[in-house]
Image (spheres, rainbow, N blue to C red):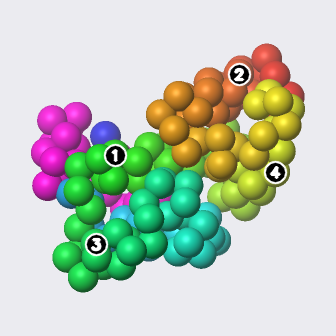
Amino acid sequence: MQTDAIDIESLSADQLIRQLKTGLPIKSFDNLKTKLELTDISLAQIVQIPKRTLNRRRLQGRFNTDESERVLRLAQVYDMAIAVFESQEKAKSWLKKPARGLGGKIPLEYADTYIGANEVIKLLGRIDQGVFPG
């Protein structure tokens, strides 16, 4: 299992789970922020990490398990968008614009919850299959 967006490479789901329980390093957040061209505050809002908590995590160097899962979830959405659109630029653009398949909501913002992220992933799957226009 690999997540390019945050530069995490694991050989198995078990290893990834252990990594999440240990906590993703703060660089995962920074890598995703850079790739999505977002500010600290914007990405923190999407992954639901308050600014003060983010500042504490920067000092500690790691996120807790729940925060790590939210960062990973968004990274997986981004990775899938790249796979579907075959371009980082197109994926970034699609994630930041209202999507018809989400009722005009912006995919990045919609992906701020587990259910929302799953809906974005399902929509990406339909786009990939040619079932729904982007």
Residue nearer the viewer, 3 or 57: 57
Kindly tell me whether residue 34 is visible in this rendering.
no
Residue nearer the viewer, 9 or 69: 69
Three-letter residue code for mark 4: Lys
Residue that mark 1 sits on: 69
Q: Across the whole image, how many numbered discs are drawn on residues?
A: 4
- Residue 25 lies, in percent from the top left, at 26, 67
Between marks 4 and 3, how big is the CA–CA gap?
Answer: 30 Å
Q: Main secondary structure of the magenta part?
A: helix
Residue that mark 2 sits on: 126
Q: Secondary structure at mark 2?
A: helix
Dot placed on the residue nearer the N-terminal end, 2 or 1: 1
Residue that mark 4 sits on: 97
Pointer 2 with pointer 1, Cβ within 8 A: no
Is residue 69 found left or right of 51 in the rendered image?
left
Three-letter residue code for mark 1: Glu
Disc 2 versus disc 1: nearer the observer: 1
Three-letter residue code for mark 3: Arg
Residue that mark 3 sits on: 57
Looking at the image, which residue is at 78% across and 40% down? 105
Looking at the image, which residue is at 14% across and 55% down? 22
Pointer 2 with pointer 4, Cβ within 8 A: no
Disc 2 versus disc 3: nearer the observer: 3
Q: Which residues are magenta?
A: 2-22
Dot placed on the residue nearer the N-terminal end, 3 or 1: 3
Dot placed on the residue nearer the N-terminal end, 2 or 3: 3
